[in-house]
Image (cartoon, grey):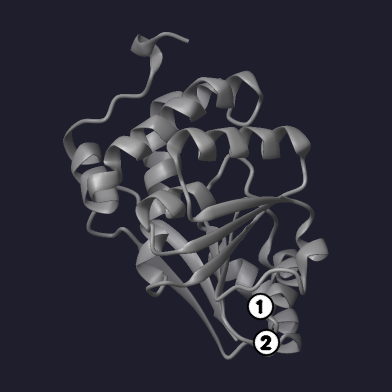
């Protein structure tokens, strides 16, 4: 893939990226280049996603950092191409990120990108989320495009071990998913369940997040 095919960053997108990533914007740009090249070559990202890598994917994920407290530990389940895990690791060097991904080819790619970007606050575990219960500690668990909330709770709540928050990146179905998951939410002792909006002042289409507090 040539440079001319890489997604451009200008105007409102640049302003948003500059605010979110600050002095690590260049690192974020290199991450997007990885997504647009080897990420497509290895099947982690579809080629049609290239023009909207910044808006639909990287910025969409990174703005969730506004809901995460300073110095927190975060486990990102089903991390795939590092969305949202690597975005958060770049935007917030104070966080400790663990990316949980079962597919070997994705794990290899993630580790290559992490090494190239020099990210020291993130590690990758090749495992299913159920397999890391008791092995990792998390103040927050994040997930994007993993499953509907009712199923997602079963693979994320045990990681939190009774305290912390799930931040699930969702779309317009968020309220409906909460309704369908109400019994499961009660089962796991959820104290609060809210639909939050991230990046409202930065993005044309802000990010919808279901926040579950234990």
Name the secondary structure under disc 1.
helix
In x, y percent, where is residue 166? 58, 72
Task: Give the residue at x 52% y 37%.
Answer: 115
Q: Is residue 84 left or right of residue 160?
A: left
User: In terms of image quadrants, where is residue 100?
Assistant: bottom right
- Which mark, by number, is residue 160? 1
> Circle 2 sits in a helix, a strand or a loop, which is it?
loop
Q: Residues within 10 Å of mark 2 (few under 14, many from 20)?
A: few
State the residue at coordinates (41%, 61%). Answer: 64
Identify which residue, 204 or 94, lies in the foreground.
94
Few, some or many residues within 10 Å of mark 1 (<14, 14–19, 20+): many
Q: Quadrant of the C terminus?
A: bottom right
Mark 1–mark 2 distance (CA, rounded to whole Å): 6 Å
Residue in the picture at 29% in, 45% down: 24
The number of discs equals: 2
Q: Residue 61: x, y in percent? A: 44, 51
118 vs 189, nearest the viewer: 118
Q: Position of residue 8 (x, y in %)?
A: 29, 24
Please tell me in which quadrant of the rendered image residue 38 appears: top right
Task: Confirm or deny contact between disc 1 and disc 2 (CB under 8 A).
Answer: yes
Instruction: Please give the residue where the numbered disc 2 appears in the rendered image.
Output: 162
Q: 111 or 63: nearer the eye?
A: 111
> For residue 150, which quarter of the picture?
bottom right
Q: Residue 213, how many percent across, how many down?
A: 55, 83
Q: Is 91 located above or below residue 150 in the figure?
A: above
């Amino acid at each position: 893939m040539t440079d001319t095919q890489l997604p451009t960053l200008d105007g409102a997108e640049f302003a948003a990226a500059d605010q979110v990533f600050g002095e690590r914007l260049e690192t974020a740009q290199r991450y997007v280049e990885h997504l647009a090249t080897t990420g497509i070559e290895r099947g982690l990202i579809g080629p049609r996603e290239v023009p909207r890598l910044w808006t639909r994917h990287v910025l969409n994920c990174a703005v969730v950092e506004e809901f995460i407290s300073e110095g927190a530990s975060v486990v990102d389940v089903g991390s795939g191409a590092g969305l949202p895990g690597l975005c958060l690791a770049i935007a917030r060097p104070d966080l400790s990120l663990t990316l949980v991904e079962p597919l070997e080819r994705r794990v290899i790619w993630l580790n290559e990108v992490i090494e190239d970007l020099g990210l020291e606050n993130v590690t990758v575990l090749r495992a299913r989320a159920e397999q890391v219960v008791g092995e990792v500690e998390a103040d927050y668990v994040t997930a994007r495009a993993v499953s509907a909330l009712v199923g997602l709770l079963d693979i994320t709540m045990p990681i939190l071990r009774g305290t912390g928050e799930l931040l699930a990146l969702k779309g317009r179905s968020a309220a409906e998913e909460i309704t369908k998951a109400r019994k499961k939410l009660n089962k796991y002792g959820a104290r609060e369940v809210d639909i939050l909006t991230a990046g409202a002042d930065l993005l044309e289409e802000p990010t919808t997040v279901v926040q579950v507090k234990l």
